[in-house]
């Protein structure tokens, strides 16, 4: 299966802590509990991150101002298109420098799923399993896989058991979510 998810289809929701808004690209739930989620957030002001106990998280700065985090008392500067992994229960606060920033976020329930985020700038081959959910988010330019193309800000969703070449004309994030 391959599906194009356009940015206009992302579902806007408030952050868990009420401090801003996220635009959900895709998610899976068991009842009310999220199993995993891929989303975009705009960080407009300094403040705490929401706590997600029992989850693993990755944040990728994609555009806008710079963001500095403090994770369990340790300073972390988010570099453009560099994934940063941290546990959902970590105490995290952020400081925005130079205006609002947007980031791509991945969240997986630690006991049930793992995720991996790769940033690509050239054609890259991935061996995919049919139980994985794979998302290709075009950060800059476009991204192509299995004959489908998405433009900057859009996402391709892949669910295949095959070797797949993913091509970008700029910069893309490839997010793999795999059940344990």
Image: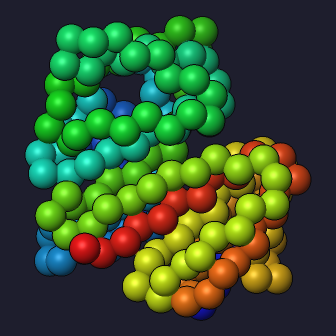
Residue 21 in view in this figure: no
Residue at 76% over, 82% down: 146
Q: Residue 175's x, y, as percent?
A: 52, 59
Q: The C terminus appears in which quarter of the rendering?
A: bottom left
Q: Residue 1's x, y, as percent?
A: 59, 90
In the image, taking residue 6 as reference, residue 47 lies left or right, namely left
Residue 105 in view in this figure: yes
For residue 75, above or below residue 130: above
In the image, taking residue 19 as reference, residue 91 lies left or right, namely left
Residue at 41% over, 67% down: 177
In the image, taking residue 167 as reference, residue 154 lies left or right, namely left
- Residue lying furthest right: 169
Q: Residue 67's x, y, as percent?
A: 49, 18
For residue 171, above or below residue 95: below
Between 60 and 118, the residue placed more toward the observer is: 118
Q: Quadrant of residue 81?
A: top right
């Amino acid at each position: 299966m391959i599906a194009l998810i356009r940015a206009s289809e992302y579902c806007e929701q408030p952050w868990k802590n009420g401090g801003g808004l996220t635009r959900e690209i895709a998610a899976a739930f068991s009842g009310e509990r999220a199993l995993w989620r891929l989303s975009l957030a705009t960080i407009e002001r300094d403040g705490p991150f929401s706590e997600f106990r029992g989850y693993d998280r990755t944040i990728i700065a994609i555009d806008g101002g710079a963001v500095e985090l403090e994770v369990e008392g340790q300073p972390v500067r988010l570099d453009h298109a560099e994934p940063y992994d941290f546990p959902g229960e970590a105490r995290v606060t952020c400081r925005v420098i130079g205006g609002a920033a947007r980031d791509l976020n991945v969240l997986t329930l630690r006991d049930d799923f793992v995720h991996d985020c790769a940033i690509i700038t050239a054609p890259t081959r991935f061996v995919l399993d049919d139980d994985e959910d794979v998302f290709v988010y075009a950060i800059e330019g476009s991204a192509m896989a299995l004959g489908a193309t998405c433009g900057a800000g859009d996402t391709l969703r892949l669910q295949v058991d095959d070797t797949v070449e993913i091509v970008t004309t700029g910069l893309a994030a490839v997010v793999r979510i795999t059940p344990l």
